[in-house]
Amino acid sequence: MARRSIRDRNSAAIAPELIEPVDAPAEQPPAVPTAAPAEVAPTAEASSKRQPATPKKKQASAPGDTDRLGIYLTPTEFDDARAAYLADWSNGGEADTFARWIAAALNDHAARTPKQRADRGGLRGRSEERTGSTRSFNIPTATIKLMRAAITADQQAGRWPSDSAWAAEAIAIAVDVARQGNGGTLPTPPERLPNRLAR
């Protein structure tokens, strides 16, 4: 038998009867994409776990929940509030942090009727020149809800306070109460209040 040349062997190797049907050329895409099902199924499952079909009701805030409340105060209002906090503590008050004293002032003001707030308060108007700054306090969420409800009641009674003006009014009344309870004077607060007071 004669020896076949390289050309004959190459022709035989690529003859149609020798090609197996399971081998597909590398450049042809597979009939079914493999990546898409693997990506689509987990994403659909994950999204169904994260997003329930029916929206959840907003949960009631826990007793320890707090929110940040920004109150615009002039330097005098801020110093008077700090002095009143110290005076109240010296006279047996329970608020051992400044933020708790602020929250108590807001709670007390919210407990008043719109008429009582109008009679005792004096809403600060917007000044021509900005002399103060916004101070932020961690206030219990429940207190902020009471404050918002009281502001709504004031609006229905014909007063239209901003959050900051309403809070400043509450603080001013608390300062007056502390001054009266301290013999008509307030102590001079230090430049920086302690984080927490202790007896």
Image (spheres, grey):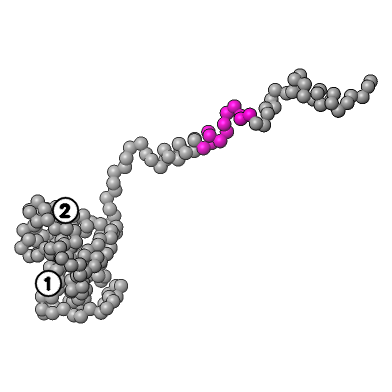
**Who's the residue at 49% across and 35% down the image?**
41
Q: Amino acid at mark 2?
A: Ala
First along the sequence among labels 2 and 1: 2
Where residue 99 appears, x then y in whole percent? 25, 67
Where residue 73 appears, x then y in whole percent? 20, 68
Residue bearing mark 1: 176
* Mark 2–mark 1 distance (CA, rounded to whole Å): 24 Å
**Residue 150, numbered circle:** none
**Who's the residue at 37% across and 39% down the image?**
52
Q: Does residue 92 appear in the picture of this structure?
A: no
* Magenta part of the chain: 28-39
Up-down: is 181 above or below 158? below
Residue 154 relative to residue 20: left or right: left
Up-down: is 20 above or below 161? above
Question: Dot 1: few (<14), some (14–19), or many (≥20) neighbours within 10 Å?
Answer: some
Q: Nearer the viewer, residue 4 or 33?
A: 4
Q: Amino acid at mark 1?
A: Asp
**Who's the residue at 13% across and 64% down the image?**
124
Count up the numbered dots.
2
Where residue 14 appears, x then y in whole percent? 77, 24
Where residue 21 appears, x then y in whole percent? 70, 22
SS for dot 1: helix
Residue bearing mark 2: 149
Q: Quadrant of the N terminus?
A: top right
**Image quadrant of residue 183?**
bottom left
**Image quadrant of residue 165?**
bottom left
Question: Dot 2: few (<14), some (14–19), or many (≥20) neighbours within 10 Å?
Answer: few
Q: Is residue 181 magenta?
A: no
**Who's the residue at 18% across and 55% down the image?**
148
